[in-house]
Image: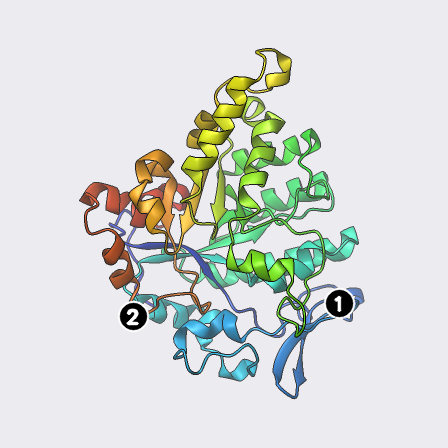
Amino acid sequence: MSTSTPAGASYRLIDADSHVNEPPGLWVDRVPAQYRDLVPRMEHFEQGDAWVMEGVKDPINFGLNAGATFSRTERRPWVRFEELPAGGYEPAARLAELDLDMVDAAVLYPTPRLSHLAIATQDPDLHLAMVRAYNDWLAEYAGYEPTRLGGVAIIPNRGVEQAVAEIRRVATMPGIAGLLIGNYPHGDPDLSPEDDPVWEAVVESGLKPHIHVKLVNEMPEDIYAPGKITQGRAAADLRFLQAPATMVQFLNSGVFDRIPELEVVFVEVDAGWVPYVKEQLDNRFRRRAVDPKSRLKKLPSEYVEEHFSFTYITDSYAIRNRHAIGVDRLMWSSDFPHSGADWPDSWRTITAVMDDVPADERHAICAGNAQRLYRFGER
């Protein structure tokens, strides 16, 4: 095992959003026998390898989900699994990749379209088997070196009791640093007071809940299919599109008054939009009558400032407007090993947009805020 970063050591750069590349046997090797024919598996196609699952129309390729280590001329959607760099599924190799980019620690998320297969599965028992298999594998991966790797475990979303039980289970696992909300725990994309026991369990666990780009409740499709200009493709190019509406769901639900310790992290949605949304929400709030219909005890912007954090990849607007967002609410991320990453030159990109940012604010955005949330070397 590599030399670990000692507890209490100074972290200079923490990647608040990176990804794994799941190995072919993750689900078929880990779920109970009765589910093995139903879970995602990797198959060979003429153009490359892809994930398939019973009842899902489109194969899920993954070349661009590991494209950062390839030159731009070599990046393509369809590849063989054997072509992928090992860091996506071998933690020792990932540590070497971090070292090359001079990144001290990384927060780990699943491959989005692939994880949607588990998140959108409607059968509660199959869904839970898939979620638990992924979380077990992730804990093993990140637990290899938890001072530098922090896995974000998936919260089940086919029933509140399942979700609470899984939160309590993963909270004891080495390497687990956060929780992923793929869909609201009770089972659909409309937030409900029924979910409150889950948020209470989240607070009790000490782990923060995360929304990576958006919530999903439908199986993925090929958003780049020829002849189709899909909404999914537009959303992929503008990743923040769902985030403001989801944030308003949390605000309007009153959950932060019922559970004031709850904090939510929006991931890979950037943050340049946050000051505008805060302004508009406060404006609408002030135009309403002051009665129970107003719902909130404070201005919407105050809840945003107290209960939400945001990761960005490249967002010069967020950096220039960091005080309107909250310097303590911004975290840098790379999206590595996806093709949008600047690996192995992340520092060059960071420096280019932070040249006039004071050192203490730069440290907060690059490492300090993430260390507060994920406690690398302290867990």
Q: Residue at x 44, y 63 (%)?
A: 144
Mark linked to residue 56: 1
Which residue occupies the extreme top position in the image? 291
Image coordinates for residue 233, horizontal then vertical, percent: 59, 62
> Height in image: 218 above or below 94?
above
Image coordinates for residue 168, horizontal then vertical, percent: 59, 42
> Height in image: 196 above or below 146?
above
The answer to whether residue 370 shows anywhere in this view is no
Q: Residue at x 39, y 57 (%)?
A: 106
Which residue occupies the extreme bottom position in the image? 46
Q: Label 2: which residue?
A: 100
Q: Residue at x 37, y 47 (%)?
A: 331
| Type of amino acid under label 1 | Val
First in sequence: mark 1 vs mark 2? 1
Q: Quadrant of residue 127?
A: bottom right
Q: Residues within 10 Å of mark 2 (few under 14, many from 20)?
A: few
Image quadrant holding the N terminus, namely: bottom left
Q: CA distance from mark 1 to mark 2?
A: 38 Å
| Type of amino acid under label 2 | Leu
Image coordinates for residue 347, horizontal then vertical, percent: 26, 61
Instruction: Give the number of the mark in front: 1 or 2.
Output: 1
